[in-house]
Amino acid sequence: MATEILPDDPALRFGRRQRAFEQMEAHDLDVLVMGRTANMRYVSGVPLLWNAGTRPFGPGCVAVRATGDVYLLSTWDEGVPEEIPHENLYGITWNPMNYVKMLKGINANVEPRRVGTDAMSPLFAQLLPMAFPDAELVDAGPAIQAAKRVKTAEEIEAIRAAVAVADACIGAAISQLQPGVSERELTAVFMDAMASRGVTTPGSQDVARVTSRRRDGAVRDGDLVCFSGGVVAEGYTGEVGRTWPVGEASHDAFARFDALRGRLLDACQPGAPGSALLDAYAAAGEPLPAGPVARGLGLGFDDPVIVGDLPATAAHTRLEPGTVMVVTVQAGPVIGQEPVVISAEGPHVLSSSPFWNADRS
Amino acid sequence: MIPSTPDLARMRRERGARLRTAMGDKGIDALLLLGNSNVSYATGASWPLSDAGRANVERPVAVVLADDDTPHLFTPFGDDAAGELDIDEDHLHGATYLDVDEGVEVFAKALADIVPAGAVVAVDDITGAMHGGRDVLFPTWPPRSASDAMGPARFAKTADELACIRHGLWITEQAMAEVQARLGPGVRQTDLTATFLHRVFELGAEANVLDPIWQVMPDHQADLPWTTHGDIACPLLSSERALEQGDVLWVDTGIMYAGYHSDFGRTWIVGADPTERQQAQYRRWKEISDAVVAVIRPGATGADLTAAALAVTGGDKPWMAHFYIGHGLGLESAESPYVGTDLGEAYDERLVLEPGTVVVIEPVVWDEGYGGYRSENVFAVTDDGCVNLSDYPYDPYGD
């Protein structure tokens, strides 16, 4: 983070915007209306105020294919790049009809046939047809995910930088691991280390979990503690997870973890199906985790989502070079998250966080 | 009376009853809830909120039936949720993935088993994949809006909800005292965030909910960014900018406790006492704030609050054009009632405060050429007036 708020670097934002417009063309979208903050930043290149959690849909950013124009919900021009002129900014409003008026102006200019949105709400399901009376309103999710799934070189560097911050913060938390410390104190150390490095926005806030799950969250000798650290740096998410014991630990679960991790990384080959990761669990004889085995990493929500509950999706997913994802390695109580970029040569792990090693401890 | 410690089981019961009453009033048979705050309200589940990127994948979802005391919860945090929330196995479901087409197909089948055919279904948010799969998910398009029921239910808080908000404020204020003690030339905005985050998590915050604002306010509006409406630009993002002697900071942030958000706003000066002119700005702010607070009681309308503020200033709105003189606070950092927005006077007149309604009062005094003053306090409407849930000094301003 710098000492002033600047737009994303031109190489980053023009590379992304080009992909977005290419996918609008491929999916036959004339206008793209985005409500999700990360999608707004993807197309506009403007840093936006971070809030935790989900947000209801509203038209936060609009991209018009015919003109290449980007319109942004921003009451001020701080962090807005020069190619988005003042007249393309619209301010915070509490009256939804003001959005309709703004969108009607765009409609009059370009007369779109197909308008895509990244999400929807009952209110805007009524209002958007008023703004675009002659257009078909469709789900733009496939177009946005097609643009975002494969990262540009600059995006991979941004994710690498975010993972480096997550590595440093999780290291700071692990260094405080000792009997008597609490989950909340370990979380506090992680957040302090993050903000002291100039990154003030977490990707997740469930940083430390004692696997015995005592009510008081206190760590005792013999416990295993799962660390899961996520940060959002310059908009990009970096995540890493490690499990460390307090004092001595059974070597067995860690050995199973190592074996599973090896199989999962082997499955992360360019062109491989996402289901290869599910198969890796089966081959290792480990039950699938309840949540995703892999999730895309990038700006906000990204493909792929590989989870045992969605077998058809996993089978259809292809791990293309340029995909970045965090892989969950779960062998009994030992859990890790590995951020991995799929390159043409094979998987590359972005994290340098150390693992607990029985021989070293 | 606000209890010193919230009774979370009672809070869940009372919220559930309010919600089902509101559903009955509005003719809604089933609510399908995706928004984090609505899911918390309906089920009692709360969890450390993630960045939206992850929150969209690991997203608890609730289905509430008007004639069923227990909500259905689809959660990725299953093992933690069950016992504590009194949700039996029939109502507790595994994670659902509504951003993925196949996830919507799987969920639609589960929904068909829960919601009777022909029921009136209302929803709060619709993912792209749900929009694509709307024909299988919704009997009619567009579906009813869940806010028809959530809005009335959430408008006034129970005593336990107020206790949660007050405890979250206490955590925030304890941490802010340490941050303010650290204030000095050379300290970066991000250092203030580091101290704040460290302390709130130690004190039991469930999550941080906003990237803290430590905006350095200039004397002249021309030194702030251009705006669409010509009013001042605020809140602006924090950076690694180092503070300087005499900088005036507008501080604004909040955290989460048991699902409930806090809100904190004060003006600080780096390493200096306020000038007489700055003291006068504070006194003006206090005059406006006191006038507004004096009219807060059950039955008062939003228009009564704005009129009280405008009576002090002689007609100039003492709040930012893109915001309000006051806003609600609860499971979101800003929620209904919004008082003094661009929705206009008629809207404000229809806003009627009830016992338990929470309003954050945040007038702004801008003194062109000399900067300005802004602070905020959280008020809960009582049976005959209101009570200030915030408890933080105005140093270095004040007597």
Image (cartoon, coloured by chain):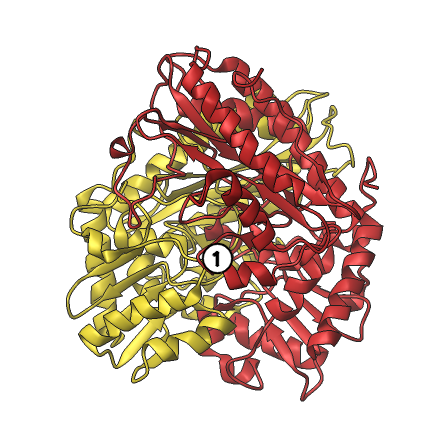
Chain colours: A yellow, B red
Q: Position of residue B380 (x, y in %)?
A: 70, 44
- Please give the name of the residue rendered at 52% of the width and 43% of the height, measured from the top-left corner: B311
Dot 1: element: helix
Q: Position of residue B201 (x, y in %)?
A: 62, 30
What kind of residue is marked 1? Leu
- Please give the name of the residue rendered at 26% of the width and 37% of the height, measured from the top-left corner: A6
Q: Nearer the viewer, residue B164 or B276?
A: B276
Q: Nearer the viewer, residue A27 or A239?
A: A27
Residue A227, visible in the rendered structure: no
**Residue A141, above or below B325:** below
Quick one: label 1, few (<14), some, or many (20+) residues within 10 Å? many
Q: Quadrant of the N terminus of chain A?
A: top left
**Horizontal side of residue A181 vs A74, given as left or right:** right
Q: Position of residue A338 (x, y in %)?
A: 46, 43
Residue on which disc 1 sits: A277
**Residue B330, above or below A177:** below
**Residue A97, above or below B383:** below
- Please give the name of the residue rendered at 66% of the width and 68% of the height, measured from the top-left corner: B149
Q: Quadrant of the C terminus of chain A?
A: top right
Q: Position of residue A238 (x, y in %)?
A: 42, 40
